[in-house]
């Protein structure tokens, strides 16, 4: 079927809708006809829904009862490579096509004619009467400058009802406008602002340029020590992509990284690119979606879902910090953006660059096997050098109860503050304390909806469940024995660490970086910028600080609990601990001042801790690869997780046992089935959860066997079954 196939008015077309249906629907082409891949609005019962023309209709239905599509939307048709990508991604992840289309049409107001779109900005003057709700609306508008919001967006962000906004509109304090027509983004100039590269940077950049010039698919693993200038190298590949007139996508693992990265892109290309993540307003999201399809956005900086935008001619995908676990979507459509980036590029003849200081074992193994080109940057850019790394053996430290900063670490922080430098104290736990226990009866406060402990967040004065988001006030008395004054925090979180640091260094300026403490992505970006400008002496942070930030004055990193990630049975525990510790340590000494990283550990002789301290990355990866190869687990085997859930625990286990007993389709390909077993967190949001694990050889046709296996069962009531191909977590 031709890419430009046209269906004249009245001919039958097959339309894939975003509705949860197991098939495509036949419609008649609307007035004026329609192109293959066009986005259309179609009637479904009494509603009008979004769909896409997927091909010719089957005609296996009374043609007199087939209704015409209402209209063709004013957006570019979806290209054949994008349709192929959605189909292949659906087949790989065993996801229904309607769910894939929903993922690819997450742009608000796509179906709305421009006349229906209204946006809201700050108007003139002050309200006749100030209320707390009105103040929050005006503060939200002030925080975001001159950005435009939809009514629902402004109301949600300010935490008010629509009527509050409408009242301010009547007074002129908030201005209602017709939404402007979506316009192209400023042109990026590949010849603008290029930096002088070091010798090994130039070698790497040239390899990437040649790949982009070829106009063919290829994947490159760009491995470089922290601070080696990987960004400048892959921006040269972006420049080459722009010269060829093709589009580039850069995926980042954390919204907080976008502000600094956008500044670098603007300095390199003379204008800001399009953005796609949850911190962007609805109006800008729709503009990005449409301009990507029309070719009016040359470059997109985005989160993992930016991979599903309808690019007109995608020539390059950068996956920055490719090892990061946030690239795996853990709900809805279960996919890994790193792997889907490689698939997407293969279908549209694009290049992929996987950039990391500590690559995933999967990418390392592919590079070793010759499937990926391997590039290495072995030294830091300019005058900066890699930080020295040392362990603090906590068995030899004298530390009072309920204290976590060792005397050795305190002395090191004292020395840095005296020099006017910055120190980072890192702990990979949000909140104040992971457990709250009653010293009278031993009761641990748990979530009412989940089998998880609630985490005290003292800054918010609340208990919070990190599984379902449920919150409640900190009780005065134990919920079990009702004795007052006996509830005590157990273990440290980032807030408790901040409290201890305040007592140890009362005169030092502190900044706490944790995702819980910022109401918006913009507030987080502002805090990071202030730290980079020298606005803090001590930074206390969670995993958020490990990802790509550049603090020129930061010369000391202290890791409070380096052993934390080594606990548990996760097959990737050692890999993730190694990556996290190396990434955190890499924040130190990124300018001309020497850096030092101190790891507080009770196991300094542990092989992972030794590998972190010595920097023997190649030896570490080889050891990990040998262990995984012997166990026939990824990347040398295949795995799939089956997650069953429902309100009745007996029904959930009955389904799990039935699956385990009827696994002939999996046995036929030599796969093994483990379980059913309760998930580590066996109840989330009131639903009981049971898991099975499937393990197969690397070459086994796993998806087809899984589809046949789970297809034997019809789910009753509120039972749900999810298949997670290549699971990254096992909670």
Image (cartoon, rainbow, N blue to C red):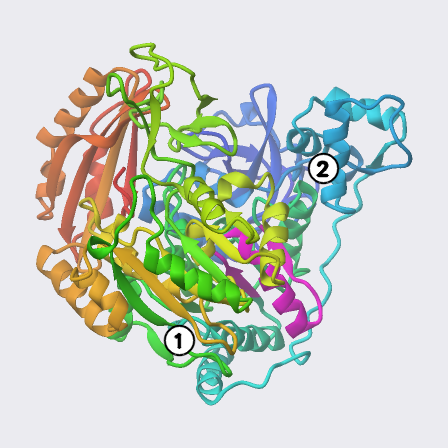
Q: Is residue 233 magenta?
A: no
Along the viewing direction, whichever of 634 and 321 lies nearer the viewer: 321
Q: Badge 1: few (under 14), some or many (20 or more) residues near its Cα, within 10 Å?
A: many
Q: Alpha-carbon distance for marks 1 and 2? A: 41 Å
Along the viewing direction, whichever of 29 and 424 lies nearer the viewer: 424
Q: Which residue is at 29% across, 10% downward?
A: 481
**Residue under pointer 2:** 140
Mark 1 falls on what kind of element?
loop
Q: Position of residue 699 (x, y in %)?
A: 17, 58
Mark 2 falls on what kind of element?
helix
**Residue under pointer 1:** 386
Q: Which residue range is magenta in the image?
A: 248-276
Q: Position of residue 256 (x, y in %)?
A: 55, 53
Q: Position of residue 197 (x, y in %)?
A: 53, 85
Along the viewing direction, whichever of 255 and 300 lies nearer the viewer: 255
Q: Which residue is at 45% across, 58% downward?
A: 424
**Residue 285 against residue 123 in the figure, above or below:** below
Which of pointers 1 and 2 lies earlier in the amino acid sequence?
2
Q: Residue furthest top?
A: 482
Q: Quadrant of the C terminus?
A: top left
Q: Position of residue 150 (x, y in %)?
A: 72, 35
Q: Is residue 547 visible?
A: no
């Amino acid at each position: 079927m031709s890419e430009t196939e046209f269906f004249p008015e009245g001919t039958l077309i097959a339309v894939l809708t975003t509705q949860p249906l197991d098939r495509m629907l036949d419609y008649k082409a609307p007035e004026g006809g329609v192109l293959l891949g066009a986005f259309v609005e179609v009637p479904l019962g009494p509603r009008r829904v979004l769909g896409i023309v997927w091909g010719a209709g089957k005609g296996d239905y009374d043609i007199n009862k087939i209704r015409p599509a209402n209209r063709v939307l004013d957006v570019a048709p979806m290209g054949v490579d994008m349709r192929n990508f959605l189909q292949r991604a659906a087949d790989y992840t065993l996801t229904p096509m309607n769910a894939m289309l929903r993922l690819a049409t997450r742009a608000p107001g796509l179906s709305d004619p421009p006349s229906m779109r209204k946006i809201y900005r700050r108007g003139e003057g002050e309200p006749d009467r100030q209320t707390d709700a009105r103040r929050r609306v005006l503060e939200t508008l002030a925080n975001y400058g001159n950005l435009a919001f939809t009514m629902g967006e402004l109301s949600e962000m300010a935490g008010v009802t629509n009527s509050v906004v409408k009242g301010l509109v009547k007074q002129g304090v908030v201005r209602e406008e017709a939404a402007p027509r979506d316009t192209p983004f400023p042109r990026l100039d590949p010849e603008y602002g290029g930096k002088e590269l070091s010798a090994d940077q130039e070698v790497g950049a040239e390899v990437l340029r040649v790949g982009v010039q070829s106009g063919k698919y290829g994947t490159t693993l760009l491995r470089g020590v922290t601070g080696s200038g990987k960004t400048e190298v892959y921006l040269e590949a972006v420049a080459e992509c722009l010269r060829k007139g093709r589009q580039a996508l850069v995926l980042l693992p954390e919204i907080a990284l976008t502000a600094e990265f956008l500044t670098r892109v603007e300095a390199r290309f003379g204008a800001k690119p399009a953005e796609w993540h949850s911190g962007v307003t609805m109006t800008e999201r729709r503009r990005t979606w449409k301009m990507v399809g029309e070719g009016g956005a040359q470059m997109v900086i985005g989160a993992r879902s930016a991979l599903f935008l309808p690019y007109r001619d995608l020539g390059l995908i950068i996956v920055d910090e490719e090892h990061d676990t946030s690239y795996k979507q853990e709900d809805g459509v279960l996919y890994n953006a790193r792997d889907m980036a490689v698939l997407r590029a293969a279908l549209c003849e694009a290049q992929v660059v996987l950039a990391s200081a500590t690559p995933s074992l999967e990418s390392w193994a592919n590079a070793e096997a010759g499937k990926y080109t391997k590039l290495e940057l072995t030294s830091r850019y300019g005058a900066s050098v890699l930080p020295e790394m040392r362990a603090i053996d906590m068995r030899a430290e004298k530390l009072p109860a309920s204290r976590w900063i060792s005397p050795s670490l305190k002395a090191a922080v004292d020395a840095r503050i005296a020099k006017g430098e910055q120190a980072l104290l890192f702990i990979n736990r949000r909140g104040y304390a992971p457990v709250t226990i009653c010293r009278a009866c031993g009761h641990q406060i748990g979530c009412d909806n989940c089998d998880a402990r609630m985490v005290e967040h003292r800054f918010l004065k609340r208990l919070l469940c990190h599984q379902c988001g449920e919150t409640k006030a900190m009780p005065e008395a134990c919920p079990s024995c009702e004795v007052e004054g006996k509830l005590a925090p157990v273990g440290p979180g980032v807030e408790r660490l901040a409290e201890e640091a305040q007592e140890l260094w009362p005169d030092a300026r502190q900044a706490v970086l944790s995702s819980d403490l910022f109401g918006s992505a913009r507030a987080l970006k502002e805090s990071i910028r202030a730290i980079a400008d020298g606005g803090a002496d001590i930074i206390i942070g969670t995993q958020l600080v490990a990802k790509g930030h550049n603090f020129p004055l930061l010369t000391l990193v202290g890791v409070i609990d380096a052993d934390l990630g080594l606990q548990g049975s996760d097959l990737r525990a050692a890999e993730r601990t190694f990556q996290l510790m190396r990434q955190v340590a890499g924040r130190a000494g990124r300018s001309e001042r020497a850096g030092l990283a101190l790891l507080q550990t009770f196991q300094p002789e542990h092989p992972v801790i030794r590998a972190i301290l010595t920097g023997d990355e190649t030896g570490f990866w080889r050891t990990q690869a040998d262990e995984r190869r012997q166990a026939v687990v990824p990347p040398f085997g295949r795995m799939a997780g089956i997650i069953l859930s429902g309100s009745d625990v007996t029904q959930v286990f009955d389904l799990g046992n039935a699956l385990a007993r009827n696994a002939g389709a999996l046995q036929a390909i030599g796969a093994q089935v483990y379980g059913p077993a309760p998930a580590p967190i066996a109840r989330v949001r009131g639903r009981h959860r049971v898991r099975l694990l499937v393990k197969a050889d690397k070459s086994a046709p796993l998806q087809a066997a899984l589809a046949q296996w789970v297809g034997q069962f019809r789910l009753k009531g509120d039972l749900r079954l999810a298949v997670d191909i290549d699971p990254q977590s096992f909670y």
